[in-house]
Amino acid sequence: MPENVYKSKNLEAERKRRAKLKGQFFALRSLVPRITKMSKESTLADAIDYIQELQSRKEQLQRELQEMADAEAEIQGSVSSTGEKPLPEPVDCKEEVEVRPIGKNRLRASIVCSKRKGALAKLAEAMSTLGLEVTGVNFLTLPGVSRVLIFMEMRGERAVAGERVRDLLLRVI
Amino acid sequence: MPENVYKSKNLEAERKRRAKLKGQFFALRSLVPRITKMSKESTLADAIDYIQELQSRKEQLQRELQEMADAEAEIQGSVSSTGEKPLPEPVDCKEEVEVRPIGKNRLRASIVCSKRKGALAKLAEAMSTLGLEVTGVNFLTLPGVSRVLIFMEMRGERAVAGERVRDLLLRVI
DNA sequence: GGACACACGTGAGAC
DNA sequence: TGTCTCACGTGTGTC
């Protein structure tokens, strides 16, 4: 090391490192709602407490949700009624689903599918969630297969694409 | 400052402080499941990500739970589940509901009611909860009135009284 | 060798 | 006054 005022080479690198760490401390602190002190030690301590709190709360919520889901599942082939993500993947199979417009605010959906418990309830509810009003239904089930013809009107402010209706139907049958 | 090797007074205090901080870093790291590197910077970054993930997951769970609760409350009219009292009183009105047996394990229900949003979905689900399998439906709605003809089979072990079906239908329409 | 992360000892500001 | 917390520059180890 030179005896003069010359500095070590990683001086600036170390400065950047410290600045980054400082920023992260700040970011961490901004995430934690309950802050005792602004010190690094308190930041870490509070973050640790908060994470533990979040973890146990998350587990608790998951348990409650599971209980709810179980209870709901206990009711025969009942309806999901939240109808967004928890929907099962669309069936890729050879189920027949045809949706076509009748006039400018009516739709006709024709469905042929393997019989499934509560299929009609699910269908009816799915249409309801889309804001479509079912005006007519013809439903018939034979051993192993069901056929349903649905007439509906778009009462909502905005039109619903037939393709969207079809996708939803494919998901719920 | 003495020119000899004597050190500053807070030397040991600073050592303890650093040790404590180090321990907290370690504790924090042990709480975060997804660790990229063992460095302080990564520890903070991962903790930040993890907290954000936990927070949004928690919110999502709370939303789902709320929706579940709402949905359950909404269905209250149709499902007994655990509920006995929360069912709304049967409508006393002049709605027409007729249920009669066809053969020994079939029922035919005929309903005429003032049109209501989602009536079909509720009806279908109600039948489902009774363990009745809907084998045929003819549904038609005209301005102000709807008519539904439902054919169903009792698949359950025990028969369902037609009167019970009628009561449930009266509740949900 | 260079880039990186760390712990160290120290002076400075805050309460 | 001390004590607490911090940022600094530096040496050292590791990849």
Image: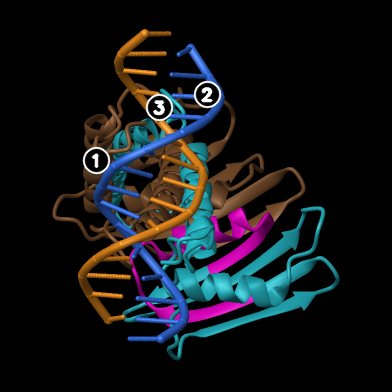
Chain colours: A cyan, B brown, C blue, D orange
Q: Nearer the viewer, mark 1 or mark 2?
A: 1
Residue B166 image offset from top left, x and y in percent:
40, 39
Label 3 – label 2 distance at C-alpha: 14 Å
**Label 3 with label 1: CB-CB less than 8 Å:** no
User: Who comes first in sequence, dot 3 or dot 1?
Assistant: 1
Q: Quadrant of the C terminus of chain A?
A: bottom left
Q: Secondary structure at mark 3?
A: loop
Residue type (three-letter) at the residue carrying disc 2: Asp
Report the residue at 47% width, 65% height from top: A8
Q: Is residue A6 visible?
A: yes
Q: Nearer the viewer, residue A21 or A142?
A: A21
Q: Is residue B4 magenta?
A: no
Q: Which mark is residue B92?
A: 2
In the image, which residues are magenta?
Answer: A109-138
Both labels 3 and 2 in a single chain = yes
**What is the quadrant of residue B105 in the picture?**
bottom left
Q: Is residue A12 above or below residue B161?
A: below
